[in-house]
Amino acid sequence: FLKLDKKGKARDELYHLETSYNDMIERLNESIIKQQQFVSDASHELKTPISVITSYAELLERWGHKKPEVIDEASDAISYEAKRMKYLTEQLFILARNDGKSALNYETVDLNTIARDVVRSLAVAYNRNIIFHEHDNAVVSADKEKIHQSLYILVDNACKYSDSEIIVRIHESEEELMISIEDFGEGISKEQQSNIFERFYRIDKARSRETGGSGLGLAIGQAMIKAHGGNITVSSEPAKGSIFTIHLNKSYSNN
Ligand code: ADP
């Protein structure tokens, strides 16, 4: 009986080992597929500006001398697409650096100060009414630059995808300090809410490109906040608006 019991235990252990090994391989495969998709999406995104630049350069070579009116159109298009490529490569670089737990520069920061800065600069840039509700105690240990960038992405999106007022609010629960950004714009359906944090995902590609978007903003913001042990959540209803919330754990320690 004892012998049988030992055999049974060994079989159980083997079985557990096999399933956890299979799980690990499956996760590895998923991450390889995601990585391949990312490289393919990134090259696709860069191909568009490259082909526009190439066509206009050829047009300039062929007609630049005979038809001077071509020069203005071509140089405008080349400069626009070159800027877009620069922006895209910078975004890709930020994403690569922030994927996973990159080094964070922790310091004591007041979320009120960061939010006030972001709200002020975007209200001017978009000439928009952005209401800001401060919170009495909003001091946390975090990477100031990264919190600033993530919040900037969210308020910038609220400006791009809505056209009435925007409300930025700092609040807290027992465990978390939160910054919410509420807009009353086009909103996001339930199915799309789970996709928007994926790299390069855009609900309306043409609209996003028009507003200078790359589909990388939310992926970058989420990676930066996750590196702090927090996360960004969304609650939204189509045609009503969206609330994006940055959650930072009060007790999160960087040690
Ligand atoms: P983009 O550069 O396209 O803005 P993001 O990663 O920041 O990329 O956002 C991904 C997509 O999520 C956007 O293209 C847009 O379709 C949607 N989105 C983001 N923020 C909002 C918002 N506040 N309201 C409605 N849609 C939004």
Image: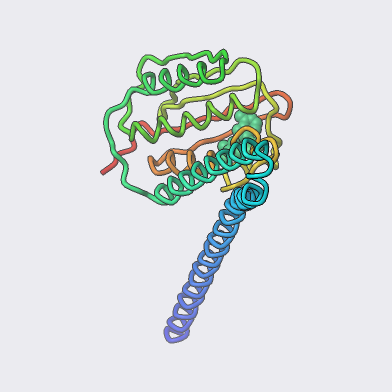
The answer to which quarter of the image holds residue 170 is: top left
The image position of residue 142, as x and y in percent, is 33, 34
Q: In this figure, which colouring scheme has been used for the structure?
A: rainbow
Considering every residue shown, the one lying at the far right of the view is 239
Vertical arrangement, residue 143 with respect to residue 116, above or below: below
Task: Kindly identify the residue that appears in the image at 61 percent across and 22 percent down.
Answer: 183
The answer to which quarter of the image holds residue 112 is: top left
Task: Kindly identify the residue that appears in the image at 55 percent across and 39 percent down.
Answer: 79
The image position of residue 218, as x and y in percent, is 54, 39
Vertical arrangement, residue 2 with respect to residue 229, above or below: below
- The front one of 5 and 14 is 14
The image position of residue 107, as x and y in percent, is 27, 32
- Asked if one can make out residue 239 in the rendered structure from this viewpoint, the answer is yes
Residue 20 falls left or right of residue 144: right
Ligand 1 is found in the corner quadrant, namely top right
The image position of residue 165, as x and y in percent, is 61, 15
- The front one of 242 and 174 is 242
- The front one of 130 and 9 is 130
Residue 214 falls left or right of residue 98: right
Task: Kindly identify the residue that appears in the image at 53 percent across and 71 percent down.
Answer: 22
The image quadrant where one finds the C terminus is: top left
Vertical arrangement, residue 188 with respect to residue 99, above or below: above
Vertical arrangement, residue 148 with respect to residue 53, above or below: above
